[in-house]
Image (cartoon, rainbow, N blue to C red):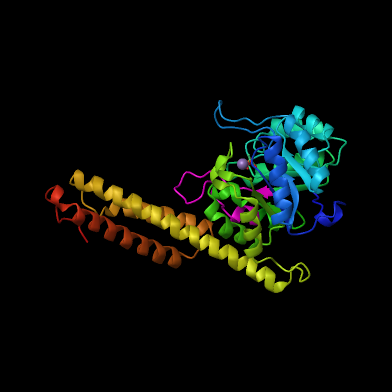
Amino acid sequence: MKPVPFARWGLGLERPLVIAGPCSAESRDQVLDTARAIVQRAPQVRVFRAGAWKPRTRPGGFEGVGDDALAWLAEVKAQTGLLTMTEVATPAHVEAALLAGVDMLWIGARTTPNPFSVQAIADALRGTDIPVFVKNPLNPDLQLWVGAMERLFDAGLGRVAAVHRGFHWYERSPYRNHPMWEIPVRLKATFPELELIGDPSHIAGERTLLPGLAQQALDLNFSGLMIETHRAPDEARSDAAQQVTPEALGRLLGELAWRSASAGPGLRDELQEHRNLIDRLDEEIIRKLGTRMEVAERIGLFKQAHNIAILQPERWRRIMDAAHVLGREQGLSRHFVQALMDAVHDESIRRQTQVWERNREGGPVPDEGKK
Ligand code: PEP
Ligand code: MN
């Protein structure tokens, strides 16, 4: 895979590239009004996005207006000079988008993980050189993401970029999709030339979370942002809660700390990137510990209901053995794993004891085994 940086795409694109527009194209007026307001309120935006065909989890939702949207995108380009972009998931979409002169395409998170679909799209694109942005797959699998881009490169496309839109995750989180920053960072480390765009809208699921996520993407040296923008977000037919008005987009872009384009990725930037990643990972560790202790409390309640002692030395020994094996695999010292897990165990016992005490009116509690 030989990624080509924006500077060699021949479209005058620069970092940071800002892409904005509604989740879905809904009507000619909605598309044109939104595009005109974006040009007025957020002049940093170079590319206008709008979904013509919307992949919905269940049938019956708004599935996009289809081909009609492509003519509206052509009008956007003629009236505003913005480049245009839409999602393709089938060879028929590709054919229609190419015919209508859409400037760039993206492959959505539900399509990327399907090698048959991506191959069919790549085959339909063979012989063209239209830029294609590949969103990460819904599931946190870096290889599937890379594989999808490789299929495009193998079909002769050079202008391929990646979009980080977060991952489905089973744990509770403030986000609609978990950012798992380590995955895009690993992608960048493997392919430093690859242009990587942050899509904080689909990570957040909720517009108030956008600024923090957008800043984190810029801090990690992403090449730009894609932000869903609608003239009347609350009336949007898809992804209403995460879209912002063109005015709010302008304010958000104005408040972000952008990297200086001229400084280049110097040593200090690289150090800062590592530090930002460490901050994200620490945050995840603490969140996971929070979830772990909640589960421990639930176990505590179960033990109390069934009159089982809190401390179960046999079970704890098995946990420690497994932790030492995993720790060794991860290159962690035995001493560190022991100290960390002891602290986790102490806190877990404390939380279970606390929950017993809080729940004491539920019946007599045996003292045996309590720490
Ligand atoms: C979108 O960009 O509107 C979209 C459907 O995104 P994703 O494929 O990331 O869910
Ligand atoms: Mn969307």
Residue 19 in sight: no
Q: From what the image shows, is residue 134 above or below residue 125?
A: below
Q: Residue at x 57, y 52 (%)?
A: 179
Q: Residue at x 77, y 56 (%)?
A: 193
Which image quarter has ligand 1? top right
In x, y percent, where is residue 213?
58, 57
Q: Residue at x 61, y 55 (%)?
A: 248
Residue at the extreme left: 364
Q: Is residue 58 left or right of residue 229?
A: left
User: Does 170 lie within the magenta span?
Assistant: yes
Q: Is residue 305 left or right of residue 148?
A: left
User: Does 296 lie within the magenta span?
Assistant: no
Residue at the extreme bottom: 268
Which one is nearer the viewer's eye here, 328 or 179? 179
Q: Quadrant of residue 262?
A: bottom right
Q: From what the image shows, is residue 38 above or below residue 125?
A: below
Q: Where does the C terminus fall, quadrant-wise?
A: bottom left
In x, y percent, where is residue 142?
64, 47
Q: Residue at x 59, y 30 (%)?
A: 62
In x, y percent, where is residue 244?
60, 50
In x, y percent, where is residue 18?
72, 54
Which one is nearer the viewer's eye here, 212 or 5? 212
Magenta residue span = 163-185
Q: Quadrant of residue 289?
A: bottom left
Which one is nearer the viewer's eye here, 346 or 264? 264
How many labels, in total? 0
Give the main secondary structure of the magenta stretch. loop
Q: Is residue 36 left or right of residue 239?
A: right
Residue 244 in sight: yes
